[in-house]
């Protein structure tokens, strides 16, 4: 009887240790993110009009490997992107689904803070490769960089919620040919994103 009790106590003691180890290793995150892009170009023909990628939702699958402090991950994102046109005070016309954006984003991760209950604040940064697809007529591949923060909140030993905010800097997906003679094209673009993801331990 005493031996059985000792075995049970050992098993109970091992469960949180095993769960914690799993939490520090492999995870798969499914995420949806809201985005905001900087202006791509301005049509200076009167009246001047600004055009930008219009606030698409980005859907992401991200594979993560976490260590004690350092980790790494790789995310694949996809979004259907419209074009917004406005006069600087507000966007008046939205052209839906003009592009499909596919993004590959490897990253290094560093744990900044951790609580006794398992919540973590992580910083992450890395390169991105964006593929802008427009029915084969104006496809573009753009390199850039991405950085941000994630608040990881555990629900169980194998399930959690990630709140992620990041900024991405890339080249412009609009060519000068598309912008036209009256278009003042920006050389680069910024994108902000806030995402909510479900993290599953593997």
Image: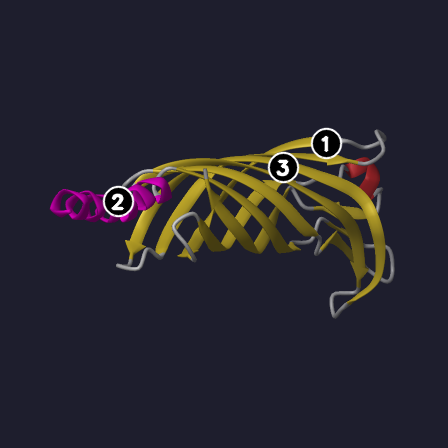
Helix or strand or loop: what does disc 3 sit on?
Answer: strand
What residue does disc 3 label? 103
Between label 3 and label 1, give the one nearer the viewer: 3
Residue 64 in percent (x, y) is at: 45, 38
Query: Of discs 2 and 1, which sits in the foreground?
Result: 2
Q: Residue at x 74, y 65 (%)?
A: 88
Seen in the image, is 11 located left or right of residue 22? left
Labels 2, 3: front one: 2
* Residue 178 horizontal/vertical position (percent): 83, 39
Q: Where is residue 132 in the image (x, y as percent from the top left)?
A: 73, 36
- Which residue was labeled with disc 1? 140
Magenta residues (range): 1-23
Give neighbour class at mark 2: few <14, some 14-19, many 20+ (Cα, 10 Å).
few
Image side of residue 28 versus residue 47, left or right: left
In the rendered structure, which disc, 3 or 1, sits on the residue that comes first in sequence? 3
**Which one is earlier in the sequence, the residue at label 2 or at label 3?**
2
- Please say whether residue 26 is visible from this viewpoint: yes
Is label 1 in a helix, a strand or a loop?
strand
Q: Distance between the residues labelled 3 and 1?
A: 12 Å
Q: Quadrant of residue 176?
A: top right
Specify whether 154 is left or right of 172.
Answer: left
The residue sitting at 79% across, 52% down in the picture is 83
Q: Do the residues labelled 2 and 3 touch (CB within 8 Å)?
A: no
């Amino acid at each position: 009887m005493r031996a059985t009790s000792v075995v049970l106590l050992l098993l109970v003691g091992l469960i949180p240790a095993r769960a914690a180890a799993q939490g520090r290793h492999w995870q798969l995150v499914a995420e949806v993110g809201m985005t905001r892009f900087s202006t791509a170009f301005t049509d200076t023909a009167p009246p001047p009009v600004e055009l930008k990628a219009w606030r698409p939702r980005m859907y992401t699958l991200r594979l993560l490997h976490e260590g004690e402090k350092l980790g790494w991950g790789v995310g694949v994102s996809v979004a259907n992107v419209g074009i917004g046109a406005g006069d600087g005070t507000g966007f008046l016309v939205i052209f839906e689904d003009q592009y499909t954006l596919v993004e590959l984003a490897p990253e290094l991760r560093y744990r900044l803070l951790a609580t006794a209950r398992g919540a973590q604040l992580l910083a992450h940064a890395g390169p991105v490769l964006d593929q802008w697809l427009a029915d084969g007529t104006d496809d573009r591949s753009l390199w850039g960089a991405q950085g941000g923060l994630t608040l990881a909140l555990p629900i169980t030993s194998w399930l959690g919620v990630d709140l992620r905010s990041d900024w991405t800097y890339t080249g412009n997906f609009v060519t000068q040919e598309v912008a036209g003679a009256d278009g003042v094209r920006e050389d680069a673009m910024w994108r902000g994103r806030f995402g909510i993801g479900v993290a599953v331990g593997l």
